[in-house]
Amino acid sequence: MNTPARRRQAGSRQTLAQALLAIAAAGASYAWAMGLGPPAVARQLAAPEAMLVRALLDIGESRFSAALEQIDKLLASNPNFRLAQLVKGDLLLARSRPINSIGNASGAPSDQVDGLREEARARLARYQIEAPRELAPRYLLQMPQEQKYALVLDSAKSTLFLFENIGGAARYVADYYVTIGKNGLEKLRQGDKRTPIGVYHVVSQLPRDKLSDFYGSGAFPLNYPNEWDRVRGRDGYGIWLHGTPRDTYSRPPRASDGCIVLSNADLEALARKLQIGSTPVVIADALDWARPGEVEALKADLLTSIERWRHDWESRNTETYLRHYAGKFSSNGMTLAQWSAQKRQVNASKAWIKVQLSDVSLLLYPGKEEIAVATFDQDYASSNLSNKMKKRQYWIKEGGKWRIVYEGAA
């Protein structure tokens, strides 16, 4: 090759390296940013993601042959990985012409290329995440023994974290790249193509043979809208965890109609951990991490309020019992005034009341407002009635005190 041609090829490759470094710099704006950072503990990315990130880093270091080798290996096992296809095209084109940004010579529709660029940023940002060995999301206050795992979505990092219940406390296990709604978070209405923020649970499983190819290897519907969503007038339905079509390894960070989408391989790995009707899924804009001592303090404060509520119910001092309820309380269409009138009438007919609670789950709601979700088995006995049920309460902090804003069957 003559000298001008070599210079053109070197210049093209350097331009591509600069483009990918710009992507990496953009990804760094998503970087692990907390007032209290986790220890520097490496995470193990799934093989396809690790190979893609290694290739992008090789390009940033101008190791183009090594990058192409990684991409070829990746596509040999995952030929439907569209971002990897795009990067390979850029690597090949960079041999003969300048490439100013990822995919600008692909000829693909601009919206598709923009989505893949966003995926590249998200993948590089995920690479920077350090395993939170000493930290846990402050949302997971207490998990009963039956609840083996919990999921927490950090939408800012396109990452779904899996935590295991170890003696009632959450411990990091793994994390997965995910796609959320095209229009981001805060679902309000049917068809708004947003993913809800809140505390949800996996309520069923839909196998591949019951679904179209669009949903990949299966789906796990969530209980959106939950009780608190309905109180706030939010509607819509069909928020699922699901996979991808056969011709698509993964989708851009914001590309679904509101569902949380994983690669089929990741969904299949996760499916083994999910418990229908039990596994909580906390969806947040960005995670709020805490040390175990902070989580214990939050838990103790809330448990104290729940115990006082239980004790005051047993005492048959109805007015003291009713002070545990917030002014905007509701339950199955009843206001606080209606609820209070019913409780006064019912409790007046009792000679004694006994209430036992077990398998208590405590989850904090993401967001600025202090809201907690308590779910437990309730064993109620009185002089003229006994019953057992699984109950769910939403507690809100008002004037520094926890009060119940919703109560009903779980």
Image (tube, rainbow, N blue to C red):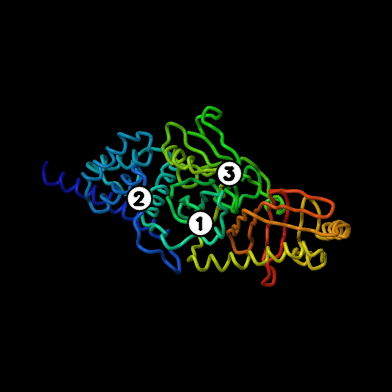
**Res 44 label:** 2
Q: Residue at x 58, y 47 (%)?
A: 194
Image side of residue 402 versus residue 261, left or right: right
Between the C-alphas of marks 1 and 2, the distance is 24 Å
Q: Do the residues labelled 1 and 2 touch (CB within 8 Å)?
A: no
In which quarter of the view is residue 358 placed? bottom right
Quadrant of image for the N terminus: top left
- Judged by depth in the image, the label closer to the viewer, 1 or 2, is 1
Horizontal and vertical percent position of residue 229: 67, 51
* Residue at image mark 1: 167
Helix, strand or loop status at disc 3: loop
Image side of residue 320 versus residue 178, left or right: right
Q: Do the residues labelled 1 and 3 touch (CB within 8 Å)?
A: no
Compare residues 227 and 272 and report the one nearer the observer. Answer: 272
- Judged by depth in the image, the label closer to the viewer, 1 or 3, is 1
Amino acid at dot 1? Gly
Earlier in the chain: of badge 1 and badge 3, it is: 1
* Residue at image mark 3: 202
Earlier in the chain: of badge 2 and badge 3, it is: 2
Label 3 crowd (10 A; few <14 / some 14-19 / many >=20): many
Between the C-alphas of marks 1 and 3, the distance is 22 Å
Label 2 crowd (10 A; few <14 / some 14-19 / many >=20): few
Horizontal and vertical percent position of residue 62: 22, 51
In the displayed structure, 398 sits above or below 20; it is below
In the displayed structure, 333 sits above or below 308; it is above
Residue extending farthest bottom? 399
